Image: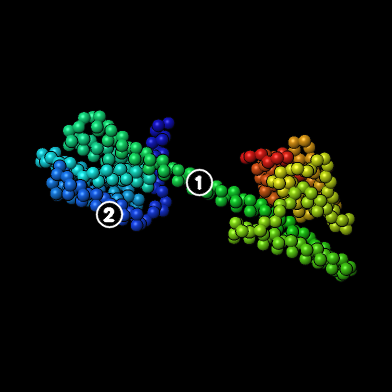
Amino acid sequence: MAADALRSLWAEPRPSDPPAIGPRDWALVALLIGWSVVDAVRRQDLVPAPLLLLAILAVVVPLLLRRTHPLVAVVASFGALAIVDGTRILTGVHGALPDSVLATLVLAYALFRWGSGREASSGVVVILAWVAIATTTDATGPAYAAAGAAVFLSAAALGAAIRYRARIRVRDVDEAKAREREQLARELHDTVAHHVSGIVIQAQAGRAVAATHPERAVEALAVIEDAATATLTELRTMVGVLRDAQDAELTPQPGVTDVEQLATDAHTSPRVTVTLFGDVDDLSPAVGAAIYRLAQESVTNARRHARHATQVAVAVTGEADRVRLTIDDDGASGAGGRAPAGYGLVGMRERASLLGGTFHAGPMAERGWRVEASLPRTREAR
């Protein structure tokens, strides 16, 4: 397991689109330069001026590269500091480094926040090597070396934590966008497609009777006009929500009682009948809207795909803890009797599943097609 974790770390890519150098970066550089100058003026125990200047440059300049080239920044900074400490060891020069060297903790953080797995693994070796050299220079014991290493590793761990938190946030946003797309696709399919299907059916019927019964064709045109108006209303509502979710005027969601509006008269083929049984009041709005959309899509599918169907029966039954929906048509069953499953069935199954319910659709034994859905009366979290 440890080996797998190491391989995963080694293969980790860089985060995409790191921030460019901005005013805050230049402000940090200015602050460190000022801090170093104050240190050089007030302290007498620092290393000689050439080594002091190199140490300051080793801290300040690489900070500007910490996001775009984190490994280069770490190698340049800690490598230069190692040269300073190595020179002190070889020449016997005494003196401390300026306090601004503590800013190298920012580089350790940035290495794991913005570097790839290979860069982080290589850079941490460079950092720990400098810590070992620095503690040797100051003649401190193993305890100080371990403490110094722990401080830099803590900064690196913080960078890794922020990195993975940002990744989780991006993933959550992507998942939310995907859910919104799926919901929009279902709404478009269940509302607009329903009305457009009705328009197509009425247009076909109008053409069939136009020559012999012009008055029936006029009735079909009136139905087409109503369906087109409803379609435009639905589209305007959806566009309004998408363009300005805060101020858009939202129409109430349909409920179980609206299922009765799907019924048609005896002159329409196939005829749609709707029957409500039991207690269908006091359902949660989400469940009521889902029952309506499931019934609406099932009726649309029957009209489009149920060959030779004469009747579609919609039944809604309210029980103590559940509400059941059944839609039967008497269209042709078997090979060629039904078009392949499309997005409609997928959307209906998703609607039922999101509310903690069940969904099934398939041919009946003798003839026709049945759609069954069972939803809890109150919405269940999923």
Q: Residue at x 81, y 66 (%)?
A: 222
Query: Farthest front residue?
Result: 42
Instruction: Find numbered disc 2 in the image and state the secondary structure of the residue it sits on.
Output: helix
Task: Identify which residue is drawn at 59% across, 48% down.
Answer: 179
Picture coordinates of residue 122 (x, y %)?
31, 41
Is disc 1 surrounded by few (<14), some (14 to 19) or many (20+) residues within 10 Å? few
Check the image and report above or below for 115 versus 136: below
The kind of residue tagged 1 is Arg
At numbered mark 1, what does the secondary structure look like: helix, strand or loop? helix
Left or right side of 69 for 248? right
The quadrant of the picture occupied by the N terminus is top left
Of 49 and 167, nearer the camera is 49
Q: Position of residue 297 (x, y in %)?
A: 74, 51
Q: Nearer the viewer, residue 313 or 180?
A: 180
**Residue at coordinates 72% horizontally, 39% vertically from top-left?**
376
Classify mark 2: residues with Cα within 10 Å, few (<14), some (14-19) or many (20+): few
Which amino acid, by three-letter code, is at mark 2?
Ala
Q: Which residue is mark 2?
A: 30
Q: Is residue 332 visible?
A: no
For residue 261, side relative to residue 51 (left or right): right
Residue 171 is marked as: 1
